Image (cartoon, grey):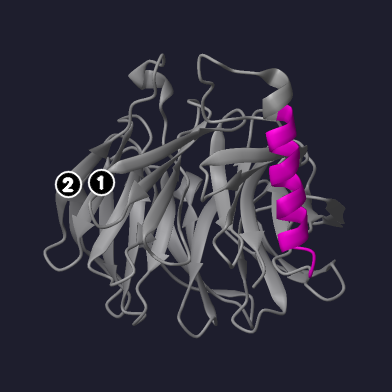
Amino acid sequence: MAFSSRPSSFNPLRSALLAAGLCTALTAAHAQGAGKVYVSSEKDNQIHVFNASGERQGAIDVCKRPRDMSFSADGQQIMVICGDSNAMGLVNVATGKLTGTVPLGDSPEMFDLSPDGKTAYVSIEDENVMAAYDIATKKPVFEVKTGGEPEGVLVTPDGKTAYVTSEVANVVHVIDLGTKKVTKNIKVGKRPRRFVMSPDGSELWVTNELDATVSVVDTKTHTEKQKIKFEVKGMRQADITPVGMTLSPDGKSMWVGLGKANHVAEVDVATKAVKTQVLVGKRAWGMGFHPDGKTLYVANGLSDDMTLVDTASGKALKTVPAGRVPHSILVSK
């Protein structure tokens, strides 16, 4: 069991009872089964399946080194990037079975879908490209050259633009999907990794792993307008490595996984102030929300587990085994 802080009057028995009460409340709140949780495990070549309370329901065998995941437009499939298979696995949600794969380039990382769900835009790390694939035909459509080690991919709601991070070049590429060309490179922090768009679409948030920061980019001017700096008491800046990010369902809070700092941080979207930090497991990256916004699920890649965080209290409720090197989390609605 992990907690965000311990006061000087820390009482182990009292804290254990409190934690038990919180976990009981969590179980009751999610007893109806809303929000099934899927966790990709890089070393198990599986997607582990949990109910909303963090109880393991089983596992789905997929391709090698599963990473990023997304539901299909109709919600009937899970698409999962498999880095060592150079493929996207297609999983039938109802049967819990891998039904096919889409061949990809060498060492795929992350992806996003077109608004109609028909095209996958994938960062291909070892080829330094963003590649587009037709999911129905399983064929490549086009590719766009990027800087070294592309990772994060985000497609705008109108389907006209894709943003791609380059970990080596320290930029965000702005790609026109109509002309299939990079139209601008936005300088951000060191080793940019992942994206989240603000609810109104005016801001693009970018995690900078080696800066201990998040860059906030103005989507109209395509310039960085602010950096949010993270500090964790008793830790060196070099050990604060933000990578994963997720937006709360109400759009008011951005939660950031601080990697080697073993914490997640809640940032107020409007003010950009860091509101809460919660101690979780080792190398906190992938995250996902229960649809009601009350529970945040955190994949801890180096402690092989998942932490459930109560967002109202800012406390970790419990931590459960989640396979070897859990990477990404996907929660059904």
Tell me whether the residue at label 1 lies in contact with that at label 2, contact meaning CB atoms closer than 8 angstroms: yes
From which residue to which does the magenta span run? 16-32
- Give coordinates of residue 192: x percent, y percent: 34, 42
In the picture of the structure, the residue carrying the numbered disc 1 is 215
Q: Is residue 23 magenta?
A: yes
Instruction: Report the Cα–Cα distance between label 1 and label 2.
Output: 6 Å
Whether residue 107 can be seen here: no
Whether residue 4 can be seen here: yes
Residue type of the residue flagged with mark 1: Ser
How dense is the environment of label 2, judged by Cα within 10 Å: few (below 14), some, or many (20 and up)? some
**Residue occupying image coordinates x 73% and y 62%:** 30
Judge by depth and name the residue closer to the eye, 198 or 154.
198
In the picture of the structure, the residue carrying the numbered disc 2 is 226
Helix, strand or loop at disc 2? strand
- Taking 96 as reference, is 188 above or below it? above
Q: Which quadrant does the C terminus fall into? A: bottom right
Residue type of the residue flagged with mark 2: Gln
Helix, strand or loop at disc 1? strand
Relative placement, left or right, of 253 versus 332 is: left
Q: Earlier in the sequence, mark 1 or mark 2?
A: 1
